Image (cartoon, rainbow, N blue to C red):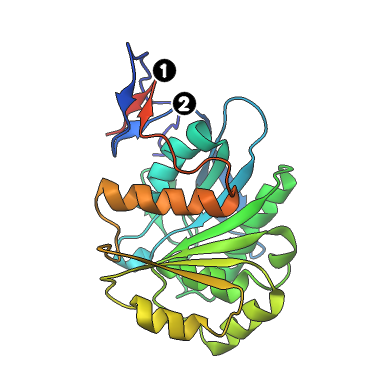
Amino acid sequence: MASDPQDYDFTPSTGPIDIRASTVLPADRRNIELKTADGLTLVGEFAAPLDGEPKATLITLHPLPTHGGFMDSHLFRKASFRLPALAGIAVLRFNTRGTCSPRGCSEGTFDGGGAERLDVEAAVRWAVDQGLKNIWLVGWSFGTELCLKYGASDPVAEHIEGAVLISPPLHRADDADLDTWAASGLPLTVLVPELDDYLRPPAAQERFAAIPQAVVTPVDGAKHLWVGEKYAARALNEIVEVVLPGQAAPLPVQWEGEAATAS
């Protein structure tokens, strides 16, 4: 059963409230379906600002589905809860092939990052067809591999402004993928936890030196999964500053108006 993005019970506040992990701020939320070139239907959600056109759009690529990654992985869920209202940024989340979440299951079978190329292309094509502008890829863990392998080549590269990588393991993306990204000239920001399980800042600096335009940002104290509001807020602020430099970060930590609490 697909979850309804309108199920949240919004109530007005009597004054400023602290934005917590489960706080949901108002947005235009709708369930969407993406159609891949090989005939699969992928399920997702699109959250956009209530007023006006989005200033930027994030296409999020989730962590490894065989290890619990899906469109509701907490950083991306919090992005969809907060960024439309706080920064005017739209957030597209979806399950890659063979991945399930409360939203539903995407058709197909996990392919280790191979056929997922078509999933990335489908998401970008959907955003372009909606007339969205200032489109960025944001990958987390396995999602960073998809960014690196497929983001810097057409038909994706011609429609995006760049990418943000969160906790890149560099397991599937190889030197050729880094060279392709370097040649594209597309901006790349890399957020590397100090205590990451796979790739820590010194090694990341060395590997991403192959991409002259890459900016590697070490994050003290953070781990691969970015658990804790301190680290989630840091990641969201870094993303917002990349896609809307000097405009919306740091994000407010309080909100006055209607809000809901997610289960």
Secondary structure at numbered mark 2: loop
Q: CA distance from mark 1 to mark 2?
A: 9 Å
Residue 122, position as x, y percentages in the image: 64, 58
For the N terminus, the image quarter is: top left
Front one among 115 and 263: 263
The outermost residue toward the top is 14
Q: What residue is rendered at 49% in x and 43% in y?
A: 249
Q: Earlier in the sequence, mark 1 or mark 2?
A: 2
Quarter residue 194 falls in: bottom left
For the C terminus, the image quarter is: top left
Secondary structure at numbered mark 1: loop
Q: Height in image: 241 above or below 209? A: above
Name the residue type under label 2.
Pro
Q: What residue is rendered at 44% in x and 39% in y?
A: 251
Residue 134, position as x, y percentages in the image: 68, 50
Quarter residue 176 falls in: bottom right
Name the residue type under label 1.
Gly
Residue 114, position as x, y percentages in the image: 53, 76
Marks 1 and 2 close (CB-CB < 8 Å): yes
Front one among 137 and 207: 207
Q: Nearer the viewer, mark 1 or mark 2?
A: 1
Q: Residues within 10 Å of mark 2 (few under 14, many from 20)?
A: many
**Residue marked by disc 1:** 257
Q: Is residue 90 visible?
A: yes
Q: Height in image: 172 above or below 55? A: below
Front one among 24 and 13: 13
Residue 48, position as x, y percentages in the image: 57, 35
Q: Height in image: 48 above or below 185? A: above
Quick check: 249 left or right of 132? left
Q: Height in image: 196 above or below 248? A: below
Q: What residue is rendered at 53% in x and 50% in y?
A: 241
**Residue marked by disc 2:** 26
